[in-house]
Image (cartoon, rainbow, N blue to C red):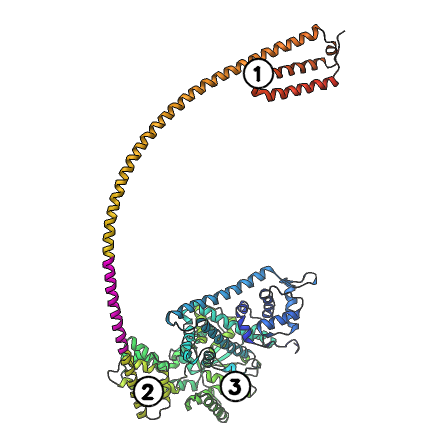
Amino acid sequence: MTKYNNERVKVRSFTVAFEQMCNFVAITKTSKYNETVKRLIQQCFVILPNEHFYKAKQFVDAIDTLFGLQIPEYQIQAGIDSLKKDQIIQQPANTSYTLSSEIHHNIQKQIDEATGLEEKIKHEWFAEVSKNILDLPLEQAWVALKKYLSRAFNRHGIQAAALLDPTIDIAPEYSESLSFLLNEVIKDHFPNEQFQIAKKVVSAFLSSVGNHSDRAAYIGQLADGAFNYFALTVAPDVSKQFLKRLNPLTLFLDTNFLFGILGLHVNPQVAVSNELLNAIKKHGLPFNLRYHQATEKEMFSTISHYSSILHTREWSQPISRAALTSNSLSGIEQKYHRLNAENSIDVESFLKPYEHVDVLLKDKEISIHRKEENRVYEETDLFHEYKKFLESKGFPKPYDACVHDIKLLDTVRQLRSKSQSTLESGALLITCDYLLYRFDWGNSRKSATSACTVLPNIFWQIIRPYIPSDIDFDRSFAETFAIPEFRTIGSGASKACSKLLSMLASFKDIPEETAARLLSNDLLIDSLRNIETDEQFREYVKLAIVSENTLLMEEKAALSKQLERERTEKEEKFKEERRSYEQEKIKAAQALKQKDSDIKSVEELKDKEKERADLAAKEAEKERRAKEEAEKLATEESSERIRAERKTESYKIVIAALLSFIVIGAFEFLIYFLPWKWLIDNSNSYGLQGAFDLFIALIIFGLFKPKWRKWCWGGGLFALLLIIIQLLGGPTKVLQK
């Protein structure tokens, strides 16, 4: 493939694309580069229905405007040609292009579904927030949430695409943590006095995403859309080669990943890490799971460390319940206190299963990697760079933790090939440690090598096309974007919180509420991180306890006053309700009395009405009988009249017939008696005589029968017409000789 044909798409603005993400989601099921370009072309017809497209350059400009993507014109033209060949678009008589109505309908339906899902989630969230918070502008909160999601998926999309093609340029802002992105967005959209409550509201939407299937689906769609967006920037030949097949990989699993799948680490990547292992086993993906011998050592060391911490005290269930309110405790401590709070358990019994971590991991088909080269000098240089990086970020790690990270990172780097794609280089390090991930990508770019570290959710994003998705995984995947990164294992905050918990457990009769408030106070934990001596630590905690107890007393006093005020208000309200009840009772009695009176009056009125109705019925009956008799008499008279009329009519017919016979007979006699030679000798003599006879009969019947007159006299006119016709000419009479 020539350099020209391998030209990359350029991203102008992901923010522009995110505004159209509901439209972009409609093509997230597309995995091939060329197919994505063709779907973008089809999107132009749907989003811009009034636009007339005649040439490829117009699609280039439209896609740039809608999605902030600058796609080379020849690639657009290739997509147009392919769509024309498949008869998806047409260009009749070289006019403007048109999209198949069926395809147009399907794309519009997908866009409407994505838009509808977002609107549904938005209104459900508004209802949820408005129940607890009344003074926060909801629309502004939604804008802030969308802005955070835009920046989070901008980071996710480009990092996932860079895993395919490490030559993609990742700007510094694409490496910022989710916590940093969230804080920046809240600062941009809310005043200082609303910062904490706004951050809490936005975080609540994200932290509960796993409990809402619609939210999980929405987050998953945005993640897929963002990845597809940035996947266009991958060199086409690299993308094509990757999508063709998955190459075998040795996946090295970091300590935090392993602790996560063992339930000993708290991190938003834990759930998706477990899903990843299940998918590898279920679908037979070509991945070998390994952990470094340094990781094994770190796991045993970490378990031993927290074992010594947990063994220092007898932990009551109230103090364990208080411990669960903290986000700063290590996963091992949190798991113990959760079990102890639910059902009292001693530390020894809790730690017993983890004495043989290697056996637990072997059951999950994860093996140890024991081959190690002597690379002291290389690791030393990398170690110092790593320490410097951590200090610059304000998150220093213990010496042993740094040594482990560098040994693991260096080993994976040595096992990798020089392939252009990170996923084709033979080995990969999967970690939940975002700091290690950022260091590897930055350091690799400086040394012009491909990075070897990846977060679980980014790795899963890459292999999603090969694995059928389900609801449980969609939720786990969505949660990795929902919660900002927690502190790492062994961090200063974790140590401070463990020490605080141990000290609180040593105090007798400390209220559980006080302990919970102290352990969940992040500002207090951060302050304790910088205290050096145990004496200062103890004094600081005592002051905090006094402060919390004072605050609790004030809150209790305020609560007591509030309860007293509410009790007084309830009493007054009860008295008022009692008075209202008595008044209503009196009114009800009066109304009942009035009702009885009204009923009696109504009954009397009904009796009178009944009497009147009976009289009216009797009168009506009399009238009916009289009417029937009159009708009967009238019917009889009518019958007599009809019979008389019929008799008269019969007489008229007889008279008319007799008269007609006489007149016709006289007429015929006169014809031959006079005689009428002109009629007798006429060629139509018989016809004329018959017509005259018919004319005479019809005229006479019409005179005697008025009802027949129209027809009789009409017939007479017809007979007269026959006379005239015969006078004019007709068949010749044969004369007798």
* Residue bearing the label numbered 2: 499
The percent position of residue 269, horizontal first and vertical second, equals 43, 77
Q: Position of residue 408 (x, y in %)?
A: 47, 86
Tell me which corner region of the image, top left, top right, bottom left or bottom right, holds residue 61: bottom right
Disc 3 on helix, strand or loop? helix
Dot 3: within a 10 Å radius of its alpha carbon, few (fewer than 14), some, or many (20 or more) residues? some
Residue numbers of the magenta segment: 557-583
As drawn, is 520 to the left or to the right of 711? left
Question: In the rendered image, which residue does mark 1 sit on?
Answer: 704
Residue on which the image places disc 3: 442
Foreground residue among 233 and 712: 712
Mark-to-mark CA distance, 3 and 2:
35 Å
| Amino acid type, callout 2 | Lys
Near-viewer residue (467 or 638): 638
Q: Secondary structure at mark 1?
A: helix
Say above or below: 727 vs 426. above
**Nearest to the observer: residue 717 or residue 477:** 717
- The Cα atoms of the two marked residues, 1 and 3, are separated by 129 Å
Q: How busy is the neighbourhood of tag 1: few (under 14 within 10 Å), some, or many (20 plus)? A: some
Q: Nearer the viewer, mark 1 or mark 3?
A: 1
Badges 3 and 2: C-beta atoms under 8 Å apart? Answer: no
Residue neighbourhood size for the residue with mark 2, other residues' Cα within 10 Å, grouped as few (<14), some (14–19), many (≥20): many
